[in-house]
Amino acid sequence: MAALDSPQWSVLPTSRPTPPAPRRIAPFLVPLALVVLLWIFGAHTLAVIVLVVATTITVVTTTSPRAQARFDRGAAWIAHHVGNILTVVLLGFVQLLIFTPVALIARLTRSDPMDPRGTKLVESRWLRRRANERSLPSRQYGDERYRQAAAGGSGAIGTPRWIRGVVGGLALLLLADVAVGSLLARLDRDDSETIDGPIFGFDPVAQEALANQPGAGELMSQLEGAGLGNSDPFIGWRFGAGVITKSEFVNVVDGARESRASALDGPAREVWFFGGSTLYGSGQSDEATIPSAIVALLDAQGIAINATNFGHPAYAQWQQVQLLEAELSAGTRTAPDVVVFYDGFNDLTLQTQFGVHDEPTHLFFGVANPATTSSPTVAQTVRSWWADHSAAAVAAGRVRDVFDDEPTIQVADIEAAPIDSIDPIAAGNAAAAIHRRGVDHVVALGRAYGFDTRFFWQPYLYTKDPLTPAEQDLVGLPGYDTDVWFPMTAQVRSQLSAPIIDLSDALDGETSSVFWDFVHTNERGAALVADAMLADLEEALS
């Protein structure tokens, strides 16, 4: 017992020692760094979830030692099993990306990259030794005789062996870079090929036109979620088969956005509406789009219609014409009595985006290259491929996007023509000529299929008078310079004639803000446009 009382025995600690400062700070910094990275790479929802979870765990474990002990045991258990899984996965990648290529190279070149002498493969790897030679080293890999290169030998920098090592290392790094980049591109790709935007370019709800509209925030979120539809080889993109959006304010089914149903009894006339995002209703709920507002106005006149809203975000007029042809050819709907086109703005945008052109196109296609245009060089093709498959290039692009705070409004998937290179008079004439060709084509279809037609040239920010202070703030933003758009607008309006009805003045005199960008309106603006269209539609339906 005396031995037990000896002061030589160490005393067990009664409390846990205080960890050093870095270990105390790490539980706070690591989750914070993860949240920052997730936010930078656009995973905002996941970043908020991680922040909430990390904050909760930190508060609980800081205030309760028992909870801290349980959390540590759970974290150790998770780390152990996750480590086992990662070991298998990562070593598998190492085997595939490093050892397998090296073994193949060694097999093809009949050289051993692990042999410091750089000799060719021989039949045996056994070292010969005689009785008078020194004994083998007792420590594994302790014999460095073969690593001591002679003067001017194979170990000197600049020799072929050193060059092979550098080239081989770079090759492995490039291979790993492409492998990781291709994996990232694969993870980012949507196999359904759904086109999701960008549709708006900036925060619409922050604009005065939508700020006081009930439910505008949820509406715009649902419009953004509805996207543009699936890619289509004939039209570009459309709300085709399998594209269904169901929400409180935005419902797209069977290729069309839902519209108000007539409240009148008895047979109803079939009216098909075609247009871009303004007719589709970017800024309005299903019950307040232009087609829906027209249904309500015609109900008051005792005229019942079934309105089918074929409006598609970002559609130019020729896409609308092609969509009409596709729907007529399919023959799956009740034939229309009247077909209404409401457009114009996107056709002018095409002229400013791609430069003046006289052939139809659309925003996500571009302008067909002339036959004399040379094909991309091999260097250009390689650079383009590398930008799409390199992890370093992808990471550099993400970092550049984070620090690039220049205001941009991207409406096409190719680089726009400089706005100051556009001849506004030529652009106005070209847009009017292309639009007229589409009108003539639809009129011919109407004669062949037996429906009446109405064509409306839409108003936009630069045709409204007066503008409210909030709308005035939207004037002259990048891509919509007044030096180009004002004369181009005047020129194209001078070219409009029957059967095209110019509604450019439909919003004149309105004292409230109806535009939340250059062309999209709130529900008040849609109602005013519908009222301006009413008389002509009554005539067509009489």
Image (cartoon, grey):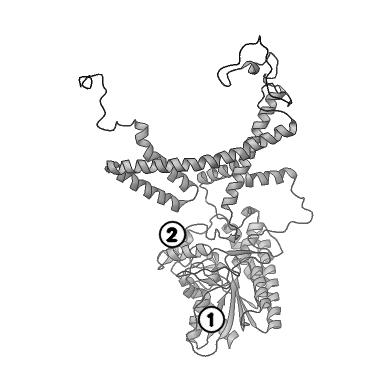
Mark closest to the chain's N terminus, 2 or 1: 2
Residue 27 position, x and y percent, is 37, 39
Q: Residue at x 70, y 71 (%)?
A: 437
Q: How many marks?
A: 2
In this rendering, the label closer to the viewer, 2 or 1: 2
Residue type (three-letter) at the residue carrying disc 1? Leu
The front one of 519 and 323 is 323
Residue 473 position, x and y percent, is 47, 58
- According to the picture, the residue beneath numbered tag 1 turns out to be 534
- According to the picture, the residue beneath numbered tag 2 turns out to be 206
Query: Where is the C terminus found, in terms of image quarters?
Result: bottom right
Residue 462 position, x and y percent, is 54, 64
Q: From the viewer's perspective, is residue 391 above or below residue 7?
A: below
Q: Residues within 10 Å of mark 2 (few under 14, many from 20)?
A: few
Residue 474 position, x and y percent, is 50, 59
Tag 2 and tag 1, C-beta contact below 8 Å? no
